[in-house]
Amino acid sequence: MQGTEDILGHRAVIDRLWAALSRDALHHAYLFEGPSGLGKHLVARRLAMAANCEAVDADGVDPARHPCGVCPSCRAILRGEHADVIELGPDPDKKTPTITVSQVREVVRQVGYHRYTGRRRVVIVDPAEAMAAPAANALLKTLEEPPEGTGFILVAHSASSLLPTIVSRCQRVRFAAVPVEALEGWLQDNGHADGPILARLALGRPGAALALSDGGLDARRALRDQVIRHIERGDLGDLFELSKGICAGDRQAWLVEVERVLELLEDGLRDAVVVASGEPVELLDGEASDQAARWADALWPTGIARLQQSLEDARAGLARNASGRVVLDALFLRFSSELGRL
Ligand SMILES: [Zn+2]
């Protein structure tokens, strides 16, 4: 049985959804909210499997509706090939993650047809914030009144990035971070060395921990060392070269890299706060404790607040389609200057 037991955390959310499923009372539009790497997509897909699992159909012995993971329906969903489970994601041809109006119209057209084989048609839209206003508007009517037996699951970082008209049509389901100790244990049980550091750096997000474990931890170390060294040296030419290097390639590619830089700077500030406050709390990045001490000395408290604001501004700029180099150049300058290196 595949069930849901292997999913780390989110027990209350899962219990609630599965209770609705077993009463045949799933809402026609859910909004799964929370930071990336928590397992929102995994839960959405597992719910689609549970709603359509043939093993449950055949013998009817599983009132809790655990998806078996091996029947033709479950396997088709896992392969992304089930005719009634539609995954709507960004158009790969676009430079920024975008779900286009024509993609949405195609899905609306598809759900207008009779279901193929499935008991319940499920449309998973992930990330829902990739729908700009025209695409979101094209979905509104169907989201409000989908055809019989069809349900939507929108997956988003936060509801604030979506049109209020979309949010108001959905039942909101909030996903929270998994306790770090639980994530640490789970990583170790699954054979990941570095469990403790992965769990802390991932801030309780299992998917983020797995990504770090998969060669990402070494990559993060290398990037951290490079970025911190340059910022602390404060050589303008070097800093601009660095942001140029990070932003090589197309937007989809460098956005990932820039987000990594923002995260490790955020982690650095958080650890500086821990050091400055003297609280007996473990650092996110224990390997960079010297840096945390230097930053605590130089930045606490107002410099840290200003740099946290700069990080927010950087994210807002990227969301408005600003160039990665412009955003990183400005950010690196702020950090160097707050650290007194310029
Ligand atoms: Zn099954």
Image (cartoon, grey):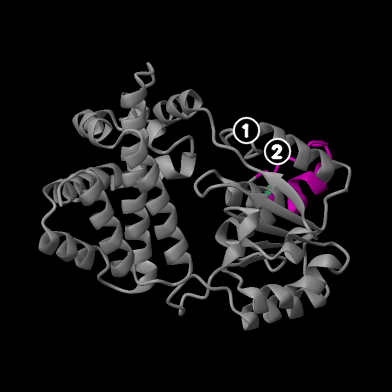
What residue occupies the far bottom of the structure in this picture?
102
Can you say whether 145 is above or below 33 in the image? below
* Residue bearing the label numbered 1: 5
User: Badge 2, how many Cα within 10 Å: few under 14, some, many 20+?
Assistant: some
**What residue is shown at x 35% (from left), y 51% (from top)?**
262
Helix, strand or loop for disc 1? loop
Which amino acid lies under the numbered mark 2 shown in the image of this protein? Ile
The answer to whether residue 195 shows anywhere in this view is: yes
Name the foreground residue: 39 vs 32: 32
* Residue bearing the label numbered 2: 14
Helix, strand or loop for disc 2? helix
Can you say whether 193 is above or below 94 in the image? above
Name the foreground residue: 74 vs 340: 340
**What residue is shown at x 49% (from left), y 70% (from top)?**
97
Which amino acid lies under the numbered mark 1 shown in the image of this protein? Glu
Which callout, 2 or 1, points at the residue further toward the start of the chain? 1
Q: Quadrant of residue 134?
A: bottom right
User: Badge 1, how many Cα within 10 Å: few under 14, some, many 20+?
Assistant: few
The answer to whether residue 71 shows anywhere in this view is: no
